[in-house]
């Protein structure tokens, strides 16, 4: 084992402290830095094409790529968010005015259930309408207080968002322009032999691209299909529920069904048989098929992870890191598998040797 001298040990300690301090000052805008790196990795093939089209001029290619990302990603998301806020406000007004009465809906469902199901709900005290409405009222009061608190700080949060967006785009420009050089320097600095670095770096990049592209495409498809079905069935706020389904579809297998499943059940128990049956068939055969076909093709195939591991790592990642976790979780899981595979190969090599 290599013995370090006192100056070398001191330098390594200083290096560790400075590295921790550097990451500490990035914490306020860690989300912006993270998504800047993710966008740089995902759109790297586009940047290379632009680099060839611009005659190998990195600055022009980086600016063009940045403009395309704003037009293709950021602008559509902003427009959808504006429409979503408007529709969410409409649904909120409908709830306040009584046009949407969850208490009445719950009573309809309970009255339509068979006696054994009602007895089961009574055992868990889930049929007490007054108590349920009291809980809903208390919950609404808490939501109102939180909404008021967020409304007061809306200006500062908007400014924080704009600053974070600016930081992300600024970083993305330099990652496009100088990314190859920066990646090479980071790769050289990692204290591992090349036979370890090559598969780990390749796995890291592959998993990020597959996870982001695959999950986003599946989310967009399932959200659009679910929103279209809700619009056809005249469910209030179809765009709102489409976005909710898109977010929940980040959870493999179960995501979108969390939204359309209860709606289908409500239709069935309240006598709207064809709507309930139609939504169930559509949800399983169309919305579910998108998840069953596209996700393994776009995510599992490239990451070489089984579906259950993708699900567990996504749920765990989102529980720990929020929305960023749907990328961080699978990346950690894939690197975990890759490291253990390298370790196993190394052991086999030594045993055979």
Image (spheres, rainbow, N blue to C red):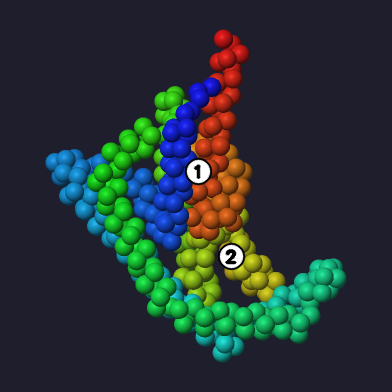
Residue ID at (54%, 48%): 329
Q: Which residue lies furthest to the left in this view?
A: 55
Indicate left or right for 175 with 31 as reference: left
Q: Which numbered dot is residue 331?
A: 1
Name the spot of residue 74 as percent of width and height, x first. Answer: 34, 62
Q: Which residue lies furthest to the front in this view?
A: 6
Number of marks = 2
Q: Separation of disc 1 and disc 2 at Cα?
A: 27 Å
Indicate left or right for 65 with 120 as reference: left
Quadrant in which residue 275 is drawn: bottom right
- Mark 2 and mark 1 in contact (Cβ < 8 Å)? no
Label located before the other in sequence (1 or 2): 2
- Image quadrant holding the C terminus, namely top right
Quadrant in which residue 141 is drawn: bottom right
Residue 29 position (above or below residue 97): above
Residue ID at (44%, 32%): 8
Name the spot of residue 126 as percent of width and height, x first. Answer: 78, 74
Q: Say what secondary structure mark 1 lies in.
A: helix
Q: Residue furthest top?
A: 353
Foreground mark, 1 or 2? 1
> Dot 2 surroundings within 10 Å: few (below 14), some, or many (20 or more)?
some
Residue ID at (42%, 47%): 18
Indicate left or right for 209 with 57 as reference: right
Between 105 and 144, the one nearer to me in the picture? 144
> Dot 1 surroundings within 10 Å: few (below 14), some, or many (20 or more)?
many
Q: Find disc 2 in the rendering and name its residue.
A: 259
Name the spot of residue 254 as percent of width and height, x first. Answer: 61, 55
Can residue 285 be seen here? The reply is no
Name the spot of residue 156 as percent of width and height, x first. Answer: 40, 75
Q: Say what secondary structure mark 2 lies in.
A: helix
Residue ID at (31%, 52%): 172
Between 150 and 118, the one nearer to me in the picture? 150
């Amino acid at each position: 084992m290599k013995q370090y001298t006192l100056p070398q040990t001191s330098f390594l300690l200083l290096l560790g402290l400075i590295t921790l301090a550097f990451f500490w000052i990035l914490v306020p805008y860690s989300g912006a830095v993270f998504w800047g790196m993710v966008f740089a990795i995902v759109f790297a093939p586009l940047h290379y094409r632009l680099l060839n089209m611009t005659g190998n001029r990195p600055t022009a290619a980086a600016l063009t790529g940045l403009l395309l990302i704003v037009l293709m990603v950021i602008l559509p998301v902003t427009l959808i968010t504006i429409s979503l806020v408007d529709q969410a406000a409409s649904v909120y007004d409908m709830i306040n005015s009584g046009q949407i009465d969850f208490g009445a809906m719950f009573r309809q469902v309970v009255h339509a259930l068979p006696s054994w199901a009602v007895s089961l709900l009574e055992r868990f005290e889930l049929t007490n309408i007054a108590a349920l409405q009291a809980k809903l009222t208390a919950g609404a009061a808490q939501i109102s207080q939180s909404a008021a608190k967020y409304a007061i700080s809306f200006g500062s949060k908007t400014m924080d968002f704009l600053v974070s967006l600016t930081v992300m785009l600024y970083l993305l420009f330099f990652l496009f322009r100088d990314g190859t050089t920066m990646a090479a320097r980071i790769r050289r600095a990692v204290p591992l032999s090349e036979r370890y670095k090559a598969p780990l770096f390749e796995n890291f990049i592959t998993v990020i691209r597959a996870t982001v592209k695959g999950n986003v495409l599946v989310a967009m498809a399932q959200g659009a299909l679910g929103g279209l079905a809700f619009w056809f069935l005249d469910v209030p706020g179809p765009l709102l529920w489409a976005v909710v389904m898109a977010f929940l579809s980040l959870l493999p297998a179960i995501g979108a069904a969390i939204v359309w499943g209860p709606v289908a059940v409500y239709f069935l128990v309240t006598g709207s048989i064809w709507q309930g049956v139609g939504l169930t068939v559509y949800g399983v055969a169309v919305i579910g098929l998108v998840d069953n076909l596209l996700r393994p093709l776009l995510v599992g195939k490239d990451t070489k992870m089984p579906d259950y591991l993708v699900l567990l790592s996504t749920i765990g990642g989102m529980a720990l890191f929020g929305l960023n976790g749907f990328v961080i979780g699978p990346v950690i899981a894939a690197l975990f598998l890759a490291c253990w595979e390298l370790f196993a190969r190394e052991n086999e090599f030594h045993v055979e040797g």
